[in-house]
Image (cartoon, grey):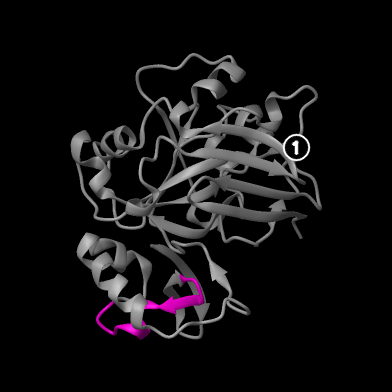
């Protein structure tokens, strides 16, 4: 199933994608929640009920619907650095036995079609296409063999990065360099895990103004989705709607000669096989 969140007079609402448009799940079946995190917490049982609701619900035309990020209000946005073998080679970095974990502020989140805004106090803003795993049923100390049972689905993500903050500030300001407002586009849809299948066999690509800049496959992931879910859950309780940005493949702007950074007017597309295309334009802040 493909899910979207959209803006309404009642706030954010959850809908499923059908061939003829969107179906608001709560309106199709009042027993289903209107918000995505509550829906994800329901696990497979909720998904089965939603499939029945989609079949009978009234269609909403996508025209004029204001999409939100598929999870508009995650408690946590967790990110993984240097998690593709080919990207690690490109960066000349040695990969250890454990992943590099950082995070973004939820205020960085933006929807498909929203602008990425270049900050007045930052330069060298880079692009990073990423597969995002969305937590469904939460948990702590999740065994690796059960970890994928806690992943409700996947989405296209864009880990926008101000390299001058990330690398040039005292101590390396990863958090701040990754957390400027608009630096975490997500969407347009959340595709449930049953529809995606194996998360380690997905083509992933980023195009800048139509030119392919990143082109790889999630088979290149060093630390798998199940490993990451289990590893992170040793530290914190993962909750429904938490997002895990799983890392980016090679081709980032900072590694190119000469470097390529985002500019006003650019159009950036992240495409992941079986999931979709996330498209955002670039503007100046202000």
Expressed as whole percent of the image width and height from the top left, the position of residue 270 reads: 61, 47
Expressed as whole percent of the image width and height from the top left, the position of residue 89 reads: 56, 16
Image-quadrant location for residue 284 = bottom right
Q: Residue at x 34, y 64 (%)?
A: 37
Residue picked out by circle 1: 261
Q: Which residues are magenta?
A: 18-32
Residue 30 on the magenta segment: yes
Q: Residue at x 40, y 16 (%)?
A: 96
Image-quadrant location for residue 159 = top right
Screen quadrant of the N terminus: bottom left
Q: Please say if 11 is above or below 240.
A: below
Q: Is residue 125 left or right of residue 192?
A: right
Most foreground residue, 52 or 226: 52
Q: Residue at x 49, y 51 (%)?
A: 275
Expressed as whole percent of the image width and height from the top left, the position of residue 55 reads: 35, 78
Counting other residues with Cα less than 10 Å from the Cα at mark 1, is it few (<14), some (14-19), or many (20 or more)? some
């Amino acid at each position: 199933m493909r899910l979207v969140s959209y803006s309404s007079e009642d706030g954010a609402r959850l809908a499923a994608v059908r061939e003829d448009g969107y179906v608001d799940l709560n309106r199709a079946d009042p027993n289903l929640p209107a918000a995505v995190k509550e829906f994800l917490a329901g696990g497979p049982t909720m998904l089965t009920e939603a499939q029945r609701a989609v079949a009978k619900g009234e269609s909403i035309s996508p025209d004029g619907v204001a999409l939100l990020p598929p999870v508009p209000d995650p408690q946590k946005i967790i990110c993984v650095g240097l998690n593709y073998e080919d990207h690690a080679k490109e960066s000349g970095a040695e990969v250890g036995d454990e992943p590099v974990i950082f995070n973004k502020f939820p205020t960085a989140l933006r929807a498909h079609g929203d602008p990425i805004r270049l900050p007045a106090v930052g330069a060298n803003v880079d692009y990073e296409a990423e597969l995002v795993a969305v937590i469904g049923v939460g948990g702590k100390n999740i065994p690796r063999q059960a970890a994928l049972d806690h992943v409700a689905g996947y989405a296209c993500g864009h880990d926008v990065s101000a390299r001058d903050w990330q690398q040039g500030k005292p101590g390396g300001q990863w958090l701040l360099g990754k957390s400027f407002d608009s630096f975490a586009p997500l969407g347009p849809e959340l595709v449930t895990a049953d529809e995606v299948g194996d998360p380690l066999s997905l083509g992933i690509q980023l195009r800048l103004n139509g030119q392919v800049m990143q082109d790889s496959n999630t088979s290149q992931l060093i630390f798998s989705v199940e490993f990451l879910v289990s590893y992170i859950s040793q530290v914190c309780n993962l909750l429904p709607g938490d997002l895990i940005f799983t890392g980016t493949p090679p081709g980032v702007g900072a590694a190119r000669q000469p470097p390529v950074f985002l500019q006003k007017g650019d159009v950036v597309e992240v495409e992941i096989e079986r999931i979709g295309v996330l498209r955002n334009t670039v503007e100046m802040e202000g």
